[in-house]
Amino acid sequence: MAVVALSIALLVLLLLLSLMAVHRHGAEREAERLRRLVARQAEEMQALRRPDGGAVLERLPDPLIVLDADRAVRRTNAAARAALGADIGAVLRHPGLRGAIDRALAAGTAQGADLSLPVPVAREVHAAVVPLDAPLDDGGRVLVVLSDRTRERVVERMRADFVANASHELRTPLTSLVGFIETLQGAAADDPPAQRRFLTIMAEQAARMNRLIDDLLSLSRIELTEHQPPADKVDLGTLVPPLAEAFEPRLQDSAARIELDLPPDLPAVTGDADQLAQVLQNLLDNALKYGARGGTIRLRAARASGERWPSRPGVVITVADQGPGVPRAHLPRLTERFYRVDKGRSRDAGGTGLGLAIVKHIVNRHRGQLLIESEEGVGTTVSVWLPRAPDQARSAGG
């Protein structure tokens, strides 16, 4: 009974520690999943009292290691062997885990330790060590349960980075505004030309902050509904042309042009018209900012085909520019918040570093796919796959 009680206490401790690391978005779903997991594991741990307890231990989802009083391995389960392989010994020699085992045996109480394991792959792991009052049949005196926390730690770091980056992005224009205001109140108080120059710059900085705040609010709203896919039918042939026309004033300034390719029989897609418009606006905006002056931006939509896209019916929207392109090493990170290939150029162009992050989350909500391809000196192509509207798919026999 002591084994069962301590095991259940261990599982409750793991639940509490897991809940502390849950990202605020989807926390309720994650908590419910963990509650079900703990309930299932508690039932399985109770079954350890039965003669077939070893078989139950073997099926536990978390890596578990049983040690005797001399710290020798008596038993491991399938999860431990799959996760650690031949590196179980190296993990047990980790100073943090060794210390937790020593404390557990000395105090007779459960202990915990957070470990950074370099083998077999780099991971963040929480180890819960539970001493057993009565040894198991094979001499086991200590249970070591390892819970992978790598994803949670990554989420925590991303959240911290997001707050730091957002603060930095706002602080820069705000500092400029404060400095110009002080100058207008002092040295430039009687200098109309300087006042006009400073006020122009202040207006640009205020607009930059306004764009940043708008993008942050937009990203927050999208994330809140990302788990709820849209159900409306959107006609891209009607949606796209007005969006392209709205860029005409900026196209004239950069001597660029937008070339549309929208087949008349293009099927409708399942989506949110406002969010899909935002996707296209962001992609066209990026193509205009970072494309070649006097170049052509090609916006194309077509029925999806080829192995790169899902097998079910869909439509692919493609925006291609003729800019300098993006080095291959940067491509996987382009959809990260505030990630910029060229920070100076991006800020000079009025970018907030959130455009592609917004695109990614909208595409995720639409259960679509996003593909970014680029070749230095040639240009960048961004493709978005969207599912066809159900009635269209049924009428086509799909």
Image (spheres, rainbow, N blue to C red):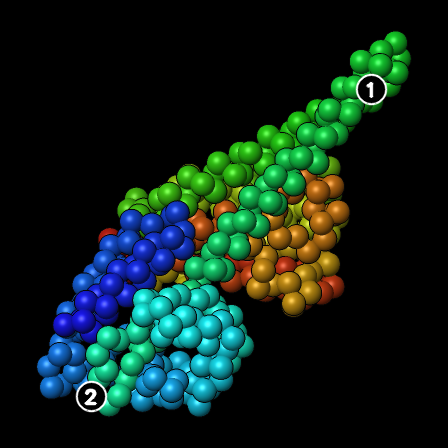
Q: Is residue 360 visible?
A: yes
Q: Which residue is mark 2?
A: 137
Q: Residue at x 33, y 50 (%)?
A: 27
Q: Which percent across, then down, holds residue 34?
A: 27, 60
Q: Residue at x 58, y 60 (%)?
A: 333
Q: Is residue 52 left or right of residue 128?
A: left
Query: Height in image: 150 above or below 171?
Result: below
Q: Secondary structure at mark 1?
A: helix
Q: Which percent across, then down, holds residue 218?
A: 47, 38
Towards the viewer: 76 or 262? 76
Q: Secondary structure at mark 2?
A: loop
- Dot 2 amino acid type: Asp
- Dot 1 amino acid type: Thr
Q: Residue at x 67, y 35 (%)?
A: 171
Query: Height in image: 200 above or below 21?
Result: above
Q: Is residue 78 visible?
A: no
Q: Which percent across, then down, holds residue 91?
A: 46, 80
Looking at this view, name the residue that lies furthest to the top: 190
Please give the label number shown on residue 30: none
Q: Which percent across, then down, holds residue 371?
A: 51, 62
Instruction: Say which quarter of the image contains residue 311.
Output: bottom left
Q: Which residue is mark 1?
A: 183
Towards the viewer: 308 or 102? 102
* Residue neighbourhood size for the residue with mark 1, other residues' Cα within 10 Å, grouped as few (<14), some (14–19), many (≥20): some
Towards the viewer: 192 or 125? 125
